[in-house]
Image (tube, helix red, strand yellow):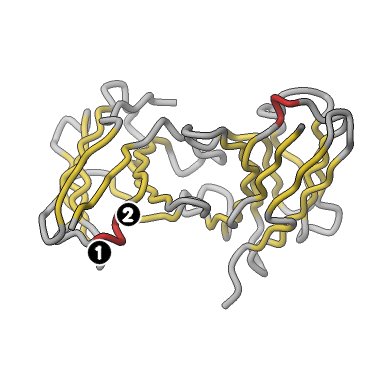
């Protein structure tokens, strides 16, 4: 399973765009990149998944460069309620378990 | 619709006591997973079921941990002779099918062993 590296924490302010970058240098050809969000006292929640280039949904965008050795989760115009831990995961869809790293603790300030 | 539910939400046990944690997955979800999350860390895989079959239990930390899903729906994680190091949040997740990276998590059971 490819190992991921992401910042331990980030601070932002309401209304700003937040970009969280994850490094996954040994990503395999058939691996996907998936991001989960976790609020205190809740289980993680799926945000977005991608394989290459750009994926966008109603919550976030995911940018993946051509070499796929990193990815960036972009949260547009964050609000206080986006304060959470964000996990970057790499794995193929034929797998079963999810492998979480330490995640990035995002703190959104007023 | 209803999501994944877990009970109890909080459990305090004395060291040496047996505990049983319940998970009700989303109806129709074939795959069910258990994870352990220590304070300040990401969840770590414990075990995986596809319907009633336990296909992977490589993450169970010791033989004191046992999980079952006898009818392919509700699952129970049992910990025998609890130790202080078992204190953690135990998360259950389900997904529609194997090979689907979108897993739906319950709120977890916070276990504290005194």
Quadrant for the C terminus of chain B, please: top right
- Disc 1 target residue: A57
Rendered residue at 14%/37% (across/down): A65
Q: Nearer the viewer, residue B67 or A18?
A: A18
Rendered residue at 46%/44% (across/down): A93
Element under disc 1: loop
Q: Is residue B93 left or right of residue B12?
A: left
Pinpoint residue B92: horizontal percent, then vertical percent. Answer: 64, 50
Q: Residue at x 83, y 29 (%)?
A: B15
- Quarter holding the N terminus of chain B? bottom right
Task: Specify the quadrant of the image occupied by residue A6.
Answer: top left
- Near-viewer residue (B30 or B62): B62
Mark 1, other Cα within 10 Å: few <14 / some 14–19 / many ≥20: few
* First along the sequence among labels 2 and 1: 2
Q: Secondary structure at mark 2?
A: strand
**x, y (%) of residue B20?**
83, 46
Q: How many marks do you count on the picture?
A: 2
In the rendered view, tell whether residue B94 sits above or below residue B45: below
Residue drawn at x 43%, y 38% is A92
Q: Quadrant of residue B16?
A: top right
Residue B25 position within the rendered picture, expressed as x and y whole percent measured from the top left:
67, 61
Which residue in the rendered view is the most extreme toward the bottom?
B1
Identify the subunit bearing mark 1. Answer: A
Residue A4, given in percent of the width and then of the height, sits at 34, 27
Q: Are marks 2 and 1 in contact (CB under 8 Å)?
A: yes
Given residues B63 and A25, the one toward you in this image is: B63
Q: Nearer the viewer, residue B39 or B62?
A: B39
Measure the alpha-carbon separation of dots 2 and 1: 7 Å
The residue under label 2 is: A48
Q: Are marks 2 and 1 on the same chain?
A: yes
Question: Residue pushed farthest left?
Answer: A16
- Report the side of B101 relative to B84 (left or right): left
């Amino acid at each position: 399973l490819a190992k991921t590296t992401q910042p331990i924490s980030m601070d932002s302010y309401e209304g700003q765009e937040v970009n969280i970058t994850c490094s996954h240098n040994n990503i395999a050809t058939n691996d996907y990149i998936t991001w989960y969000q976790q609020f205190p006292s809740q289980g993680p929640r799926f945000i977005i998944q991608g394989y290459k280039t750009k994926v966008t949904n109603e919550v976030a965008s995911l940018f993946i460069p051509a070499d796929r050795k990193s990815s960036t989760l972009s949260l547009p115009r964050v609000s206080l309620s986006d304060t959470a831990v964000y996990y970057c995961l790499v794995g193929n869809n034929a797998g079963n378990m999810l492998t979480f790293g330490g995640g990035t603790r995002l703190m959104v300030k007023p | 619709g209803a999501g994944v539910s877990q009970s109890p939400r909080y459990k305090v046990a004395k060291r040496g006591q047996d505990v049983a944690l319940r998970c009700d997955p989303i109806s129709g979800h074939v795959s069910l997973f258990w994870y352990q999350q220590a304070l300040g860390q990401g969840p770590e895989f414990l075990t995986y079921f596809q319907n009633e079959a336990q296909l992977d239990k490589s993450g169970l930390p010791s033989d004191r941990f046992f999980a079952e899903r006898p009818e392919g729906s509700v699952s129970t994680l049992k910990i025998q002779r609890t130790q202080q190091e078992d204190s953690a949040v135990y998360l259950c997740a389900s997904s529609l099918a194997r090979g689907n990276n979108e897993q739906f998590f319950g709120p977890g059971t916070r276990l504290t062993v005194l």
